[in-house]
Amino acid sequence: MRKPHLLAFDPADHLVDDTAIAVYLTEALAADDAVHFQDALQAVARARGMAHIAESTGLGRESLYKALKPGAHPRFDTVQRVLGALGVRLTVTPLDHSGQA
């Protein structure tokens, strides 16, 4: 029996508009996992074009790749600049402590 050939999934291929990007980043942030959010941010930056994001943030393309690579610890300022270049921003809302969803 022949093994099926699976294609690698790249979320950047599906982030085609501002709404999809905002939803994807919001869900990644809601997961409360910094590594997951950083992976999502990198996927969105790739979807928009790293060269374009680098230019918009004032960062070098190599610096941007380095800041968003797995295991990196980008400065909050860098994250804010990337989010701004993507046309989105973080928002803060109170946690629901009532025990209800």
Image: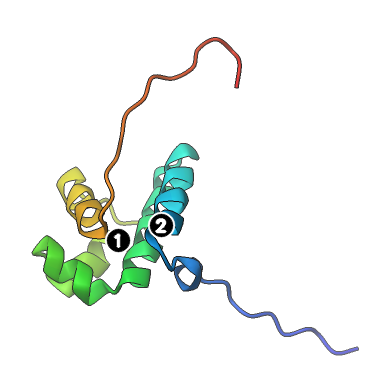
Tell me the quadrant of the picture where the N terminus can be found: bottom right
- Name the image quarter holding residue 68: bottom left
Instruction: Please tell me which residue is depicted at 13% across the width and 61% down the height of the picture.
Output: 57
Vertical side of 85 occupied by 8: above or below: below
- Mark 2, residues whose alpha carbon is within 10 Å: few (<14), some, or many (≥20)? many
Q: Secondary structure at mark 1?
A: helix
Secondary structure of residue under mark 2: helix
Q: Is residue 61 left or right of residue 46?
A: left
Residue receiving disc 1: 68
Quick one: 98 or 75, which is closer to the camera?
98
Residue drawn at point x = 47 percent, y = 38 percent: 30
Q: Can the viewer see residue 25?
A: yes
- Residue appearing at x 17%, y 69% in the figure: 54
Whole-percent x, y for residue 91 in the image: 31, 34
- The tag on residue 81 is none
| Relative side of 82 to 29, left or right | left
What is the crowding at mark 1: few (fewer than 14 residues within 10 Å), some, or many (at least 20)? many
Q: Are marks 1 and 2 in contact (CB under 8 Å)?
A: no
Answer with left or right where residue 51 lies relative to residue 93. Answer: left
Residue mark closest to the camera, 1 vs 2: 2
Which amino acid is tagged 1? Leu
Report if residue 32 is visible in the image: no
C-alpha distance separating marks 1 and 2: 16 Å
> Viewed as shown, does residue 62 lie left or right of 35?
left
Query: In front: 39, or 81?
Result: 81
Residue at x 27%, y 51% (from the top left corner): 73
Instruction: Return the disc, 1 or 2, that comes first in the chain's sequence.
Output: 2
Which residue is denoted by mark 2 in the rendering?
21
Residue that protrudes farthest toward the top in the picture: 98
Q: Mark 2: which amino acid?
A: Ile
